[in-house]
Amino acid sequence: MGNIILRCLKAVCDDTPPASPPHQPSAASRPQFASPAAAGLAALGHHLLNFETTSQVPEGLSQYVSVSKKTQAKWYAKILAAWKESSPPPRTPEEAASLVARALQVQRDVLAGFLQFYSLPFPQIQTQVSGPSSWPEGVQFELHTLPVDAKLVGDGDGMTVHVNTTDPRESSVVPIEVHEAVIERRQARAVKDYTRADALKKLIKDAGYRVDDKEDTLAREYRIRLRGIDAPEMNMEYGQESKDALTKLIQGKPLTIHVYEEDEYGRLVGDAYCNGVFVQEKLLRKGCAWHYEKFDKRPALAQWHREAQSAGIGLWANPNPVAPWTFKWEERNKKNGHKPYQNRRNAQRDQRVPIPAY
């Protein structure tokens, strides 16, 4: 790793790493750079070398970004990892700025402060790599989420996700009062006014956003309902197992979600992909959910459902499991004093609740 950075430094400062960042005083013998940005690139490389060996972050950065030293250390670890993976490594200030932006994924003003510390230019960030022409028919828009929190998986077919407001689709629609609350909360925390900070955090959450102090990110919250499947309710047989399967598949990982519509409960209904894997396919093949044929006619989903059922996998270990829609119908009617067997017959008769034939 050190050799990679040193080769980059050689390209911008005649084989000699800088003795100090471009914004700090330097000795007369300091190497000459073509521009402050070139000096900043060399300084960044020098600091990464130092961080790799000492885990120390540079002094003075706190004057440009109001985050803790611990958060700064996480930033340098991310940049270092991204630099290792880049091929070829950044050789210009513009390439270095783009790498930093991709690695940190922080709010625009925070990123600007970090780049200003190194006199690096603010990059043109292109995070949305696909568009309507590449989406399946019926997709309204696409979400690129932050890593999923396991605690926010509600059951086997739904979860809450967060999308960084640096995403182009999100950045232009954040309410001004949310931006103001984030800034005011940061100031309140700086003076240890935690009562005020907590009140502002609630205001941000009530507006549908989440602020992460560790990563210093603002994210929008979305509730997601997986399209085309129906998993057992949590108070049904195999409900917990279905939820655990979804959690294991997506926890700690970012998702790409193709959103088709919003349901009556305010949830976005869509197809989820985790590292290129179609989430609904995995759940159906593992016998963790039913194909919701009433609302989704895709043959592939029906096929995966039948294969798991024929193999007796997952919930199909029970030869006659109750479908979630039937269970919910019967539960509602029990509260009204009706008998379960009447509910089932009525459901089949009026087709309000489909009973799968497979």
Image: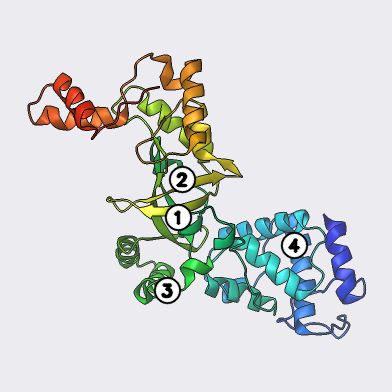
Label 2 vs label 1: CA separation?
9 Å
Specify which label sits upstream in the sequence, 4 or 2. Answer: 4
Which one is in front, 31 or 59?
A: 31
Query: Is label 2 in contact with label 1 (beta carbons under 8 Å)?
Result: yes
Which one is in front, 96 or 273?
A: 273
Residue at image mark 4: 48
With respect to residue 304, does 219 lie above or below? below
Residue reaching furthest left?
Answer: 337
How many neighbours does mark 3 have within 10 angstroms: few (below 14), some (14-19), or many (20 or more)?
few
Q: Secondary structure at mark 1?
A: strand
Specify which label sits upstream in the sequence, 3 or 4. Answer: 4
Determine which quarter of the picture holds residue 189.
bottom left
Residue at image mark 1: 162
Q: Which mark is residue 149?
A: 2
Tell me the kind of residue under disc 1.
His
| Number of the front mark, 2 or 1 | 1
Specify which label sits upstream in the sequence, 1 or 4. Answer: 4
Query: Is label 3 in contact with label 4 (beta carbons under 8 Å)?
Result: no
Determine which quarter of the picture holds residue 355.
top left
Specify which label sits upstream in the sequence, 2 or 1. Answer: 2
- The image position of residue 212, as x and y in percent, is 46, 58
With respect to residue 244, does 317 lie above or below? above
How many neighbours does mark 4 have within 10 angstroms: few (below 14), some (14-19), or many (20 or more)?
many
Residue at image mark 3: 183
Q: Secondary structure at mark 4?
A: helix
How many neighbours does mark 2 have within 10 angstroms: few (below 14), some (14-19), or many (20 or more)?
some
- The image position of residue 275, as x and y in percent, is 61, 44
